[in-house]
Image (tube, rainbow, N blue to C red):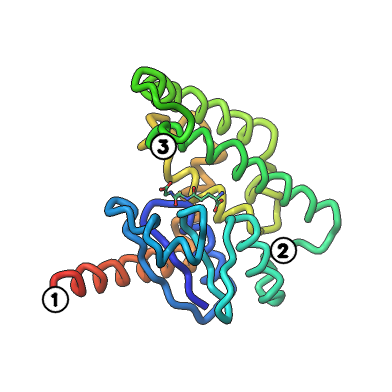
Amino acid sequence: MKLFFALKTISLASQIALEEAGADYEVIPVDLQAGEQRSEKHLALNPLGRVPVLVVAGKSLTETPAILSYISRRFPESQLHPEAEMDIARMESFNSYLCSTVHIAHSHRMRGYRWADDVAAIESMRKKVPQTMSECFGLIERNLFSGPWVLGSRYSLSDPYLFTMASWLEGDGVDIRKFPLIQDHYQRMSERPAVKRAIAKADAALGAAARDAQL
Ligand SMILES: N[C@@H](CCC(=O)N[C@@H](CS)C(=O)NCC(=O)O)C(=O)O
């Protein structure tokens, strides 16, 4: 398996899940700043021009909820997927909220050009990000998060997904301390060996890519 990723993006959630599952995979950096996501080569993998892309036996999988779900089913022993139907539905509901609402709110900071051409409109969208991200995380803290993990006592795919988005809060102008449950979750996630391994592996791949670029 090959995971096409970029630093500080949602691809970290899939990478943590691969680490939790003990999967054998390779990470391949995509340079978003240089626009590599819009290269012919990357568009052949993901016509949307985004990361992550998980390539399995030559086939591309895109969209974080689907990639996470694939990893949990491919590695059932990892227990990343709950057994009870209602827990599975709650996990999917949470992950859908992150994908369809929280990620979009965050994207208004750097990708406002997707929704408007007018410079003032783009700036107005950017300015609203601290408010919309605070509202999203407020809802998670009050209504969606059971604790100590998203679903309660059971660690699941929702945890690396939430952790990755919580890592964006500072850059989005939101103080994580406003959300004590999420702050505690973020801290505990940071200490998980799978999270440390994922970050180290991504850093090493970027180091290698930077070295290759200099050759
Ligand atoms: N719905 C997709 C969103 C993927 C996405 O937007 N990824 C961002 C990074 S967080 C990206 O690749 N952006 C590059 C661009 O917009 O040019 C998912 O959940 O995987």
Q: Identify which residue is drawn at 47% across, 54% down.
A: 50
**Identity of the amino acid at label 3?**
Arg
Q: Position of residue 29 (x, y in %)?
A: 36, 65
> On the rendered structure, is 181 left or right of 172?
right
Examine the rendered structure and indicate whether residue 105 appears above or below residue 60. above
> On the rendered structure, is 194 left or right of 57?
left
Tag of residue 111: 3
**Identity of the amino acid at label 2?**
His
Q: Identify which residue is drawn at 63% across, 51% down.
A: 149
Q: Identify which residue is drawn at 34% across, 58% down.
A: 36
Tag of residue 49: none
Q: Which residue is mark 1?
A: 215
Q: Secondary structure at mark 3?
A: loop
Q: Quadrant of residue 122?
A: top left
Q: Position of residue 97 (x, y in %)?
A: 65, 40
**Identity of the amino acid at label 1?**
Leu
> Which mark's residue is nearer the viewer, 1 or 2?
1
Q: Position of residue 189 (x, y in %)?
A: 50, 55
Q: Secondary structure at mark 1?
A: loop
- Mark 2 neighbour class, 10 Å CA radius: few under 14, some 14 to 19, many 20 or more: many
Task: Point out the image quarter for the C terminus.
Answer: bottom left
- Mark 3 neighbour class, 10 Å CA radius: few under 14, some 14 to 19, many 20 or more: some
Label 3 CB sits under 8 Å from any ligand 1 atom: yes
Q: Identify which residue is drawn at 36% across, 18% down.
A: 120
From mark 1 to mark 2, how far is it between C-alphas? 43 Å
Q: Quadrant of residue 56?
A: bottom right
* Residue found farthest to the left: 215
Looking at the image, is mark 1 or mark 3 earlier in the sequence? Answer: 3
Tag of residue 81: 2
